[in-house]
Image: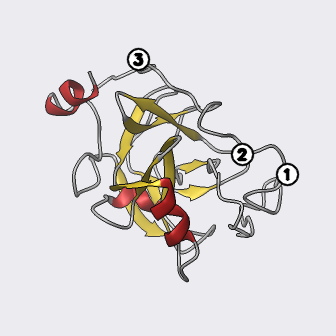
Amino acid sequence: MAAKLMREGKVRGTGKRLGIGLSVMKSRLHGFGCFATVHIPKNCAIAEYAGERITRTEAMRRMRLPGVKRISELDADLYLDGSVDGNDTKYINHSCEPNADVFIIDGLMIVFALREIVPGEEVTVDYLNSFEEDRAVCQCRTASCRRSLTKGPRKTVSEHKTRQEPPYYPF
């Protein structure tokens, strides 16, 4: 189903380029971020998080390497590394009060708006961090900031939202 929606142009950000309605700019949160250039309604599909599909073992190996990590858990033994063969959704930053979330649809990670996102607003998600080794410090500065990407209750892939049908595809 997700492949059909991508062929029909109903998911932004598939392939190597970021879709219409998003741009990468300097972020106050961390380095660069993805920003809305158009109004994005609540529950709307924003983009696919793309990257090289790797095993859990390879993901753990890469997490020990220096530098920025762009690895997300797809299922128990399958991960996506957005820094390899990904698109600009790799610049979506973390927030403890996110305006978007990721749903797994037909084996793809699709970013959806949790609420209305206005032009100029940075798209953020609460990272689904399953890496014990990651000691990254949160920089979102929100009222409910956990100060750590791993502190507090972490979501695992079994708790992650998996849908057969997306909430809303307006385009």
Alpha carbon distance from label 2 to label 1:
8 Å
Q: Which mark is residue 164?
A: 3
The mark lying in front, picked from 3 and 1, is 3
Q: Quadrant of the N terminus?
A: top left
Near-viewer residue (78 or 159): 78
Residue at numbered disc 1: 143
Q: Nearer the viewer, residue 83 or 99?
A: 83
Q: Secondary structure at mark 1?
A: loop
Q: Quadrant of the C terminus?
A: top left
Q: Is residue 38 above or below residue 122?
A: above
Residue, far left: 7
Residue, x 65% and y 58% (percent of image)? 131
- Farthest-out residue, top: 165
Q: Residues within 10 Å of mark 3 (few under 14, many from 20)?
A: few
Which residue is at a point 65% across and 47% down the rendered structure image?
A: 126
Residue position for label 2: 97
The kind of residue on which mark 1 rests is Ala
Q: What's the residue type where badge 2 is placed?
A: Glu
Work out how far the residue at label 3 is from the one at label 2, CA to CA, in angstroms.
26 Å
User: What x and y, as percent, mark residue 164?
Assistant: 41, 17
Q: Earlier in the sequence, mark 2 or mark 1?
A: 2
